[in-house]
Image (cartoon, rainbow, N blue to C red):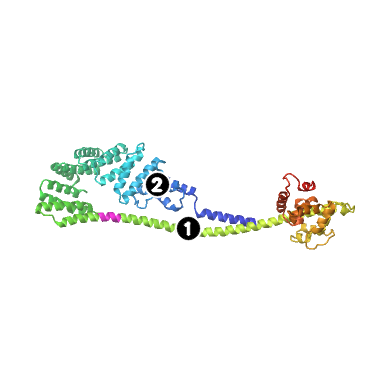
Amino acid sequence: MVKNIIYVLIAIVVFSLVSCSKSMSQYGKDIDEAENVMRTNADSALAILDAIDPSELKVDSIRAEYYYLKAYGHMVRKRSMIGDSLVSFVHDYYRGKDIVKDIRSGIALAWYKFWVGDTSGAMVKLDSIAGLSDVPDSIMVQALRIRVLLGASEYQGRQLVPLAKKLHELETDTLRKTEAKYMLMAGYEYAGETDSALCLVDELIDYARKNRWGDKHFMFELERAQLLTETGRNADSDRLIGEIFQKAGPDNGAADLLHFQYAINALNTGDISRASRHLALADSLAVKLRGDDDVYFRSYSNLLHAMIDFKQTGRVKLMHINGLNNRQSERFNRMEASQWESERGALQQQSRALALKAESEHKTVVILVISLVALLVIAASAWAIIVRRQHERENEERIEALEKMVDEYKSSPVATGTGVADSSALRSAMLKQLGIIKMVAETPTEQNREMLRKISSLDGDIDGELVDWKNVFEMIDNLYSGFYEKLHSKYGDILNLKEEQIIVLMLAGFSTKEISVITGQTTSTIYVRKSSIRKKLGVPEKDDIVRFLLSGR
């Protein structure tokens, strides 16, 4: 029954400890699963990672994998990376260990820098990646796409051209390759190399026409009209815009941009009234086509209005300058609001994670307290069982020794009446003085009652002591030529009473178990005392103590 209770308690403790926290191997399995899922469904992979408390990840390799997948998932899903600051630790960890994760974590770090407003730092990081050798094309192309995109957003020209060329060479997908050529065209335009840009846009127009890419064809034609304006070919630009209107109709989706380009061409040729007329049409169409989302267009429109007014009146109107500034401020504020919203989302996510962690820690504390109480109960129960078993074992050893002594006495010459004075007489005297009843009564078993029946046949009084040692020592001297008197006189100053008792009983031929019963000590204590006797008397380890003393050495 007791064993079953202990087993149940142990099972409860083990289950509690296992449920408190996962092992590092289990965290590793969860993160590996997220990595596999990331290839097909980034949202599901992020959901798996969100269920993990990163503070529980104590192994650097597992922590790095966790934060790497988090940042990579956010990047793939184009989500805020404000909360991915530990991607820097990830990039340092994988440097020189895993080329793929090294490059990808570097790309994620660049995106993180972009999200926190450090666009220049992001481009520097991507430039360092683009300059590496022996990087797989499939990985390098990812870095180049982002680098070229950021460079175009910053209107880079000469820096952008070689990167866009390299990207165009590495791209294998047709659409991706076309996008890379378009970015290269933008690089040439920003670098002032409009002839090169026109060559590329002509190639793009031909490709779009052959493959019947209507929207792309339309966009490339518009880009060509803008490039013609940049080269001073305003009439050619107007002619191309007219062709676009003929093909796409007057209410096409880019009509505001086309009229805006008309206005620029007219302004460049000095036709202010025409410029003003087309700009007014562009403004009205922008409101119709883009609604409230026409901030980007109006930032250009206000600048052109200011230029036209200056041409017409010779004065700069503060209204247009304020309008231009307001549009830029509005755009900046929207970007700030977007970043603030991203930061708030990251903080909310961290807050949810902390709340879950606090709840988990509370449960852990409760479980640990219960486990501790259970362990204390188990320890107390085990100790009680051990003590009880030890007492039972000692009692069994004593009873076994006593039964043997009684049986030997009954078969001895003294008991049978022959009167032989040997060690049997000593055994008889000792058995008569033992307080056996007191000892065996502690455990009233059938075996003990049989022992009492045997002892009742022996003569002797019980005076509270197991053995009358004075009589024992006298008997030893009578039987063994004054052995005890010689022992005490020679070694009485270094041997204690218990050690003298053990020696005389050994002389009389008692076993260790029998000595333990007579002296009221455990067998282990008798062994310890024998070792002490050897040291005190200088008895060699292999020599018998009694023979050593009888030899007089």
CA neighbours of label 2 inside 10 A, class few (<14), some (14 to 19), many (20+): many
Q: Is residue 170 at all visible to an observer of this figure?
A: yes
Q: Which mark is residue 361?
A: 1
**Main SS class of the magenta portion in the image:** helix
Report the amino acid beneath label 1: Glu
Residue 50 among those drawn in magenta: no
Q: Secondary structure at mark 1?
A: helix
Q: How many numbered circles are shown? A: 2
Q: 162 left or right of 83?
A: left
Where residue 537 appears, as percent x and y from the top left, is: 73, 49
Asked if 443 appears above or below 528 in the picture, the reply is below
For label 2, the SS is helix
x and y percentages locating residue 228 in the rendered image: 17, 42
Looking at the image, residue 69 lies above or below residue 381: above
Residue 29 spot, x, y in % from top left: 47, 47
**Considering only order in the chain, which callout, 1 or 2, is on the residue closer to the N terminus?**
2
Is 334 included in the stretch rendered in magenta? yes
State if disc 1 and disc 2 touch (CB < 8 Å).
Answer: no
Residue furthest out toward the bottom = 463
Question: Label 2: which residue?
Answer: 90
In the image, 162: left or right of 409? left
**Residue 152: x, y in percent?**
26, 45
- Which corner quadrant holds the N terminus? bottom right
- Residue 1 shows in the view: no
As rendered, which of 551 and 436 lies closer to the eye? 551
Label of residue 319 in the image: none
Q: Residue at x 68, y 57 (%)?
A: 388
Q: Which of the two residues, 455 or 467, is positioned nearer the viewer here?
A: 467
Q: Amino acid at mark 2?
A: Val
**Residue shown at 51%/60% (left/top)?**
366
Magenta part of the chain: 332-338
